[in-house]
Amino acid sequence: MDKIFRIDMTNLTVAIEPVPEAWKGLGGRALTSTIVAAEVPPTCHALGPNNELVFAPGLLSGTAASNAGRFSCGAKSPLTGGIKECSAGGSSSRILARLGIKAVILQGQPKGDGWYSIVVRKDGAEIVPESETLGMGNFAVVDAVAKRHGEDFGVISLGPAGEHLMAISDISVKDPDGRIRSFGRGGLGAVMGSKKVKFIAVDPEGTANLPIADPVKFKEANKAFTKTLNDHPVSGQGLKKYGTAVLVNIINEAGGLPTKNFTTGQCDHHDAISGEQMYDNIVARGGEPTHGCSVGCQIQCSQIYHDEKGEFVTSGFEYETIWALGADALIKDLDIIAEIDREMDDIGVDSIETPVMFAVAMEAGILPWGDGKRLLEMLREDIAKGTPLGRLLGAGTGNLGRAYGLTRIPVVKNQAIPAYDPRAIKGIGVTYATTTMGADHTAGYAIATNVLNVGGKVDPLSNDGQVDLSRNLQIATAAIDSTGLCLFIAFPALDIPLCLTSVVDMLNARYGLALTGDDVVALGKHVLKVEHEFNLAAGLGPETDRLPEFFELEPLAPHQVKWDMNPKELERFWSF
Amino acid sequence: MDKIFRIDMTNLTVAIEPVPEAWKGLGGRALTSTIVAAEVPPTCHALGPNNELVFAPGLLSGTAASNAGRFSCGAKSPLTGGIKECSAGGSSSRILARLGIKAVILQGQPKGDGWYSIVVRKDGAEIVPESETLGMGNFAVVDAVAKRHGEDFGVISLGPAGEHLMAISDISVKDPDGRIRSFGRGGLGAVMGSKKVKFIAVDPEGTANLPIADPVKFKEANKAFTKTLNDHPVSGQGLKKYGTAVLVNIINEAGGLPTKNFTTGQCDHHDAISGEQMYDNIVARGGEPTHGCSVGCQIQCSQIYHDEKGEFVTSGFEYETIWALGADALIKDLDIIAEIDREMDDIGVDSIETPVMFAVAMEAGILPWGDGKRLLEMLREDIAKGTPLGRLLGAGTGNLGRAYGLTRIPVVKNQAIPAYDPRAIKGIGVTYATTTMGADHTAGYAIATNVLNVGGKVDPLSNDGQVDLSRNLQIATAAIDSTGLCLFIAFPALDIPLCLTSVVDMLNARYGLALTGDDVVALGKHVLKVEHEFNLAAGLGPETDRLPEFFELEPLAPHQVKWDMNPKELERFWSF
């Protein structure tokens, strides 16, 4: 019998509730967004007692489905002021799902200064005062929880940045190798910190195989699904070999690699920070070029990156991070970038927001362009310790840019813009502007069709067709984010019809339903509308569905293009 | 023939334009808001080339009317993101009016790093490269302009904070004694700084008496008007003797004096920071308890405050400043408060936003509660010099509070809440929430009727009647702000019918019109609606017409009251 764990941090009580009828068909993002929209007053302070932090495995999490190891975390975001959903891998999603826990809701706020940790078990949860791990980085927390509770516990934790309630802070999730995955964006770490929870440990005791209504059909569908993952060149080859960093050279070639705080679209030293260079380093030093973030992953886009001495530095070393540090902040050395990546995981900060903020800090003159060593020092000495300088940086790209009176501040709804310049790749600009999440490439990855020729081809330099492209992708994404499946299944899903029908078959086989592709589309639309209603009620009206003005004023090399999408065209996005 | 000076800082050109027909009946706030709404794209970056900074004397400025020495400055605010109008005294309003200049519009933005000064003369303006005064405080700028151009020039200038484009920066105006008045709120200094203008000098050469359609009627009306100013106890006695600081003890008694960052409504050391104490110090030390900010002032609420050695410290030493430093930031020594007031004038920062921000900084642990010396040091060493700490502070109350993850951040539309707690004086809460300006007591001074029994009596602790009270006051205020008259004429205007009819008579006599009181009300409504439309188009929808959540969660002593106004009731504000 599925259940919802409601953990009240005001009264330090735990309630185990049946799943309300209206929420039974929901999982992942559909469930977190529905709960947040139903229970959180849209205009509340995101770090006050009225916000809630919700964790929810997806509809296929915990099953044998390939790439179903992800879960969602939702809340009102202290960074954007709107609704937020993040997806992460790691081991906790699978454990929660296999305990029959559809969602964990953290609500309220303790009155005093004391901190807590939470242990979630099959039949209940304990809220205990926490002191040992306070101030610790995430790697040490993972070790401490393993010692205290067991190696096989799931861990959902905060680094020091989350304890400081910084808007750049994220929430970390232990992966099957004891390393760090993240609910990266929107300052969710600060929400967990505002509830004074340093970590949640998830006890695997009592996990069980989930009921499958039609096991044979499920197995067949999963087999067909897995084949599409392996057959598609992006999910089956590109991501497997080079990880997401395969994109450095591709996006540079497209002229859309934002460089030196979005002042140009190509980076001279792109080869030095490319996926190909990363692969060569990994192979030469005995790391692992392919690695999964969760059990059941077929794509294996993660990797284990070693230093020159052959010692572990980081894993889950993503294109976005490498772009932001390497091109946007002009740090030319991939090894320093890797060290910063690890440090960001440890301190618990978003590896997009943070380096984009540092590029703005470089433009502001706080540190020299490309100075990765000084950046590392500021991470360790200022952000982790919460000095005034650390607070200035830790509040994110928008706050920092405003403090220096800059006009080139790459944010939408106050969240940093990721690794694709919207002037040269206009479909992603529509996604940045319109998504409920603030600037977020994963919300509707138009790069697929604008650049990678996946799902057809829409000219990246033209405005034509971009709103429809982004809308279709955002709807599909919202549905995928509700299944617990990795978003990268979208590559085969866009090109191979069998991929999506197999997913629908798995959902039907799991729950004994007769859904069609239209039902999945309807779910995606429903999720977007629930989120959009929340944002409107929070004060994020259509005037906030815009890119920063500098994209309209400053042409981007090499194509010498500006952002020139008519706002009326953008407003058409929500007509569905 | 009236004219508009349009100064283009992109091309460094000046155009003298006739006044468009639609703008002929407008002045002051009505004119600045109309121009900003007509010419500034609401979603533009406030510090980019598309914003404009507009100065406009009022409809009665430059005449013999009492208390008509004020003018308006308008722009899109970098602090609130909405439209902004500030009113200030000083000598420039009268000079501009008597040169026949209805408005000076600064538009565009220079491409390079160079700074400029501007000299406005009867028949043109010069834009000249500026270096001598860069980095100077406002007092030194005033001296430098006097030496370079003449003692009798008007001066509109920036301190270092405006050069740093800080959101707490203001624009200073030289008063007839060579001291500083300010367009205080909303970061207008940053807008002027973004246009690279350090100061505007206004040459009085060629000023002339203004044409008066009916001089006899004008003189009679002004005489009657002046009598009402002198007859009313607030404008004729209270403000004259104790200045605005007369309010310290009154608002403390009402339980609405926000103390220690809005955690309680009364301050133990209120006597030490009261208007009565200020008066005693001034008299004992040879200062001047009564003093006018501009030619023709009858109320004389300003003063000259000396230190213990009898030397000048500050003038225009206002209740808001004394409250924010004395009660909200717990600085008990009026002499240190005076020194800080002078320093804020010199550096060019809003003396409401800045101390409210410092009280938040104290709550954040950046400096100890009540430590005026450390605060002075931070003003001089960090804010004036633009260090990272100075930037953290200089971005204002909202930005700082967010950087520290605080929930008790007293701002509306990101602008600091002034000296009256909305929980205990609910009418002013309606004004804070609904005014187009962000939290601003001057937009609709409900204290008059909630506390001072001026214009009747509305119970400050009840929600009944507050929306209507605030609306009527905001409409009247928008009209008064368009005349160039000091807002303090509102006290007699609310109680003595002859006051307002005399103002209408003066307008009619000046321009040969036949306006009625209804026309004045219609003007006020029109101004509010123009501003509101701009704000809606800038993304400040009804959800931003709210007070911060903490007012709803934390009861205020001594009345143990919360803010409990129904948002629907607030939304009724705009039904007119």
Image (cartoon, coloured by chain):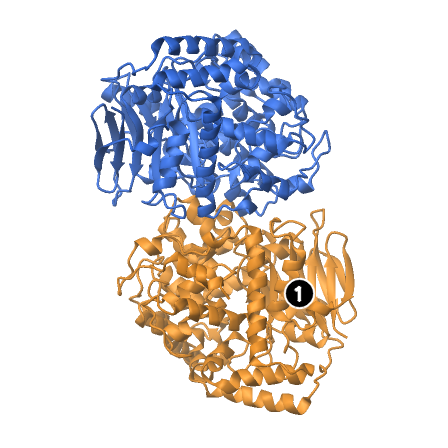
Chain colours: A blue, B orange
**Image position of A433 (left or right of A29):** right
Q: Dot 1, crowdedness within 10 Å: few (<14), some or many (≥20)? A: some
Q: Nearer the viewer, residue A529 or A347?
A: A529
Q: Is residue B497 above or below residue A399?
A: below
**Depicted A60 relative to depicted A400: above or below:** above
Residue labelled with disc 1: B144
The answer to which image quadrant residue B190 occupies is bottom right
Please report the residue visible at 62 percent of the width from the left and 49 percent of the height from the top: B44
Q: Position of residue B341 (x, y in %)?
A: 48, 65
Whole-percent x, y for residue B278 in the image: 40, 75
Subunit that carries the residue with mark 1: B
Amino acid bearing label 1: Ala
Q: Could you say which quadrant of the image residue B234 lies in?
A: bottom left
Quadrant for residue A22, please give it.
top left
The percent position of residue A80, horizontal first and vertical second, equals: 47, 41
Question: In which quadrant is the N terminus of chain B drawn?
Answer: bottom right
Left or right position of B522 against B411: right
As helix, strand or loop, the secondary structure at mark 1 comes to helix
Q: Can residue A313 be seen in the rendering of this structure?
A: no
Location of residue A359 with respect to B209 vertically, above or below: above
Q: Could one spot residue A10 in this view of the protein?
A: yes
| Residue visible at 25% across and 26% down in the picture | A120
